[in-house]
Image (cartoon, grey):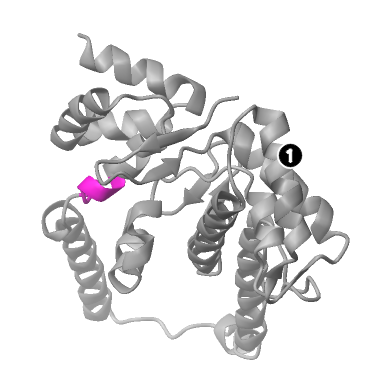
Amino acid sequence: MDSGLDSTKKGRSYLKWTDEMDKAMLDVFVEYYSKGDRDQNGWKPHVYTAAVKKVREKCQIELTKENIISRSKTFDKHYAIVNKMLSQSGFGWDDEKNMVTVEDDVWNTYVKANKDATSYRYKSIKFWDMISTLYCRDRATGAGARTANESAAEMVEENANTTVNNKDTNSSTQADEDRPKKRYRSDDSIATMLGDKLDNFTAAFKADVLEPPPKRASPEEIWAVLDGIPDLEDDQQLAIYDVLVADDRKFKSLVALPERMKKKWVLKQINT
């Protein structure tokens, strides 16, 4: 049985988790969650014992209860950060890439006030539906548990309700708007036309000249994506890191690829 433990320079060791190990552990948690074996104080002791046994048997790897607890804390952190983002307007969830979706301007504003979310711009978090159920803050009753798609759908519904309310508010003025308008005099018409043209010119000028160029991905965002690609050696990570820091277009190309193709793309870039 593989020990699964890597030694560090200080003599300490850590367990490198795989998707198969995560799935085995979360399957156990889901099973016992449905039995009521988790409350606001955490899992009952026998749940950790069952998780250790399941991961050992499923993945043929040696691990301890402390490894399970540590990994569970990691998922708890993921949930807290990602769920907070999904509760904000402008954020969504990509089921295929297992990551949040957001426009650059919304993201840049958000991370200024939420530094702990910096590495989550392109971070892939698999099994989100299970994580969002297990680590929901309302654990005792299960109230409030929701998937990423449900979080995004809630925001869409709120926006739709706002639109309906605005239409109702404006309906009282509709009769006045339908009345015949007073004709402008010829000089008023010319002034209005020139004003419209000036407004259009100003808007175009701002779009072409005053608006800043799209923000490049930060080193932290690039490293977060590379860290999520399995089985890359340190030298390979450093080599492609240099490439992506220098070329933002290549970084965006990497992010757009399916997970199964990212490693092949990276190796191709550093070997050419």
Which is more toward the observer, 25 or 206? 25
**Does dot 1 land on a helix, a strand or a loop?**
helix
Residue lying at 72% horizontally and 31% vertically, measured from the top left? 57
Q: From this view, report whether residue 64 is shown above or below residue 76.
A: above
Under mark 1, the amino acid is Lys
Which is more toward the observer, 170 or 221? 221
Which is more toward the observer, 143 or 154? 143
Q: From this view, report whether residue 175 is shown above or below residue 26.
A: below
Looking at the image, the residue that sits furthest to the top is: 272
Q: From this view, report whether residue 42 is shown above or below residue 118.
A: below
**Dominant secondary-structure state across the stretch colored magenta:** loop
Occupied quadrant, residue 161: bottom right
Occupied quadrant, residue 20: top right
Residue 69 lies, in percent from the top left, at 58, 57
Residue lying at 26% horizontally and 28% vertically, measured from the top left? 234
Q: Which residues are magenta?
A: 214-221
What is the crowding at mark 1: few (fewer than 14 residues within 10 Å), some, or many (at least 20)? some
